[in-house]
């Protein structure tokens, strides 16, 4: 060993001291959810380019096909059906919300099963000072950020296509984020209760996500559907989010009570989902 | 009662429904000791480890880690510990070095500490050249070493290892033992479950043998062998047809006799002398072997030979 190394070693060793356990515990109690969110974001970073492509290419394709292609036909035949706005303006807020809900259906299903069962990644931090509810919260925080980035990107592209004439249009990105949570958190609660994978998530995708996408006033106003199936829209976060988005992007005229109902519904579904998720995480990891 | 004990369990019990996985066990671990829990599958070892690790609530009894109750002060208890679980749960999608850094963040450790510490631990785990590899590209032994490195990121004074070498090849096991032995030399308290007896003999200062949630025996490997077995064991094979019948003719040789389908074991302090007695009775085994008594003999004696699934 050279004398240079000898000189450096004690200094390096002195600098490299972990803080005492009590400090770790205090920091974890206070910031633990964010510590776990950091982990999820680091994993997401591995998929950065595919996320960027998805966040730009998918909106651009949808807006071009629906907002330009289909819209030419629709606008020529009955703009009045959409409250006097162009078809592009009508569907743009719906597409932003639907994209967030689609992302939610991915981020709050398989990764939860992965955390508990497949690669058991939740159990690593579980042995650290973090508590189960912080692990759940960290996942939610990271995914919420993803919704936000994705929705803002979607909104910017909508604006470039001329799909958001109002000054408050940017609020639709926030609405989409909340809609993503109001669908995603109940799904997360369900995913965290599953102990055996027998294709439940594929069923959720086919029989819940797709119908919500199609029958939530996305491509046509909900009241043009028969009354018998309108309830799908009423219980759908996609519909509540879409209607709220329309109020912001082009000032859709709506009874203010209904606007309050949209906000309350989205928040209540997200809150209920979170309470159940939290309970499920604590129960499952404390056994 | 040892006032310095870092872990103290009194009548510790854990029930799952009507089944008592851990049925009122008591033990103490002083600082710096290497303490082993031995037992067949389902004995309650992992459940005990989870309670010590502050991730599973006990049903009754007392338990303190560094004087803290893990059911009340979970984060504070876990901040003292390093944990190597039975199943690796590394972040497979992150790089090797990043796994260490992310884990350190859970303890609120700053990056200025974590970056050099991660490099130091990679060196310790002989994984420096894999720092930028993805975890899913590592072999089983490398993953295990990385899990151990990860458990040391917060410089714990107590390290919990649940079957640390299960599934590893002999080379990988020996490297791991060497690393664990170094930690022990640095004064880290090791709590270890295993069903490899050689591992327990190598690493443990003291151990408890657990079966069906109870402690069957407690002591150092040498004292357990002294207490529950003889100094040597003579293994004789007469062919599977004859082993059972010949047992009767061997009565009185050694201190104890055990007839198995494939061989006959004679427990004696002097194996060679026992072998001479066998020859003197005109019996000619196909093969004979005198070996020292091991912890495995103690274990099988205490927990039986029938298979536990």
Image: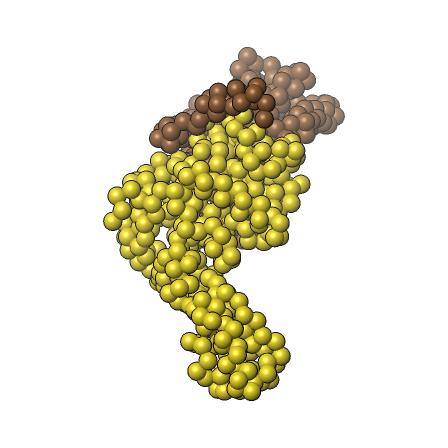
Horizontally, residue A168 falls left or right of residue B204, namely right
The answer to whether one can see residue A275 in this image is no
The answer to whether one can see residue B197 in this image is yes
The percent position of residue A260, horizontal first and vertical second, equals 43, 26
Q: Residue furthest top?
A: A167
Q: Chain A is which colour? A: brown
Q: Depth check: give the residue in front, A72 or A98.
A: A98
User: Quadrant of the rendered structure where residue B218 is?
Assistant: bottom left
The percent position of residue B152, horizontal first and vertical second, equals 48, 36
Horizontally, residue B63 falls left or right of residue B108, namely left
Q: Residue at x 28, y 49 (%)?
A: B62
User: Quadrant of the rendered structure where residue A126 is?
Assistant: top left
Q: Depth check: give the residue in front, B31 or B115.
A: B31
Q: Is residue A176 above or below residue A121?
A: above
Q: Residue at x 55, y 30 (%)?
A: B120
Number of numbered discs overlaid on the protein picture? 0
Query: Among the chains, which one is yellow?
Result: B
Q: Residue at x 50, y 81 (%)?
A: B277
Q: Depth check: give the residue in front, A145 or A132.
A: A132
Q: Is residue B174 above or below residue A12?
A: below
Q: Is residue A19 above or below residue B179?
A: above
Q: Residue at x 46, y 80 (%)?
A: B253
């Amino acid at each position: 060993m050279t004398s240079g190394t000898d000189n450096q070693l004690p200094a390096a060793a002195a600098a490299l001291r972990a803080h005492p356990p009590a400090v770790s515990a205090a920091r974890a109690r206070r910031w633990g959810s964010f510590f776990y969110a950091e982990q999820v974001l680091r994993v997401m970073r591995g998929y950065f380019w595919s996320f960027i492509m998805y966040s730009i290419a998918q909106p651009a394709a949808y807006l071009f096909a629906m907002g330009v292609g289909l819209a030419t036909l629709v606008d020529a035949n009955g703009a009045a059906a959409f409250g006097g706005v162009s078809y592009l303006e009508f569907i743009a807020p719906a597409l932003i919300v639907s994209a967030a809900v689609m992302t939610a259906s991915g981020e709050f299903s398989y990764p939860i099963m992965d955390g508990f069962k497949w690669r058991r990644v939740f159990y690593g931090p579980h042995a650290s000072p973090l508590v189960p509810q912080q692990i759940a919260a960290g996942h939610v925080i990271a995914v919420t950020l993803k919704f936000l980035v994705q929705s803002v990107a979607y909104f910017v592209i909508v604006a470039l296509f001329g799909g958001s004439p109002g000054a408050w249009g940017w609020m639709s990105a926030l609405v989409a984020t909340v809609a993503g949570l109001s669908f995603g958190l109940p799904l997360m609660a369900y995913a965290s209760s599953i102990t055996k994978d027998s294709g439940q998530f594929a069923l959720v995708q086919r029989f819940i996500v797709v119908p919500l996408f199609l029958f939530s006033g996305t491509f046509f106003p909900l009241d043009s559907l028969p009354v018998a199936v309108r309830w799908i829209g009423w219980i759908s976060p996609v519909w509540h989010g879409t209607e709220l988005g329309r109020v912001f992007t082009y000032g859709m005229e709506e009874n203010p009570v209904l606007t309050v109902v949209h906000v309350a519904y989205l928040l209540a579904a997200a809150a209920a989902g979170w309470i159940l998720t939290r309970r499920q995480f604590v129960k499952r990891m404390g056994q | 009662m040892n006032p310095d004990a870092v872990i103290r369990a009194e009548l510790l019990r854990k029930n799952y429904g009507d089944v008592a996985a851990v049925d009122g066990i008591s033990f103490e671990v002083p600082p710096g000791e290497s303490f082993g829990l031995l037992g067949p599958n389902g004995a309650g070892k992992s459940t005990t480890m989870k309670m010590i690790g502050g991730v599973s609530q006990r049903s009754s009894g007392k338990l303190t880690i560094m004087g803290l109750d893990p059911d009340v002060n979970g984060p504070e208890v876990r901040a003292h510990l390093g944990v190597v679980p039975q199943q690796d749960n590394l972040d497979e999608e992150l790089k090797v070095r990043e796994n260490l850094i992310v884990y350190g963040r859970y303890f609120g450790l700053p990056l200025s500490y974590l970056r050099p510490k991660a490099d130091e631990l990679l060196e310790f785990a002989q994984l420096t050249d894999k720092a930028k590899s993805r975890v899913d590209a590592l072999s089983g032994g490398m993953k295990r070493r990385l899990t151990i490195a990860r458990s040391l990121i917060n410089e714990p004074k107590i390290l919990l290892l649940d079957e640390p070498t299960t599934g590893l090849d002999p080379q990988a096991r020996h490297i791991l033992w060497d690393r664990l032995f170094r930690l022990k030399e640095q004064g880290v308290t090791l709590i270890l479950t295993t069903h490899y007896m050689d591992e327990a003999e190598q690493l443990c200062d003291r151990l408890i043998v657990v079966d069906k949630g109870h402690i069957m025996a407690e002591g150092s490997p040498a004292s357990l062998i002294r207490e529950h077995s003889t100094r040597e064991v003579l293994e004789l094979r007469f062919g599977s047809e004859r082993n059972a019948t010949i047992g009767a003719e061997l009565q009185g040789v050694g201190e104890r006799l055990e007839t198995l389908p494939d061989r006959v074991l004679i427990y004696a302090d002097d194996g060679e002398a026992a072998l001479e007695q066998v020859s003197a009775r005109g019996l000619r085994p196909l093969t004979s072997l005198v070996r020292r008594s091991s912890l495995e003999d103690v274990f099988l004696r205490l927990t039986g030979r029938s298979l536990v699934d």
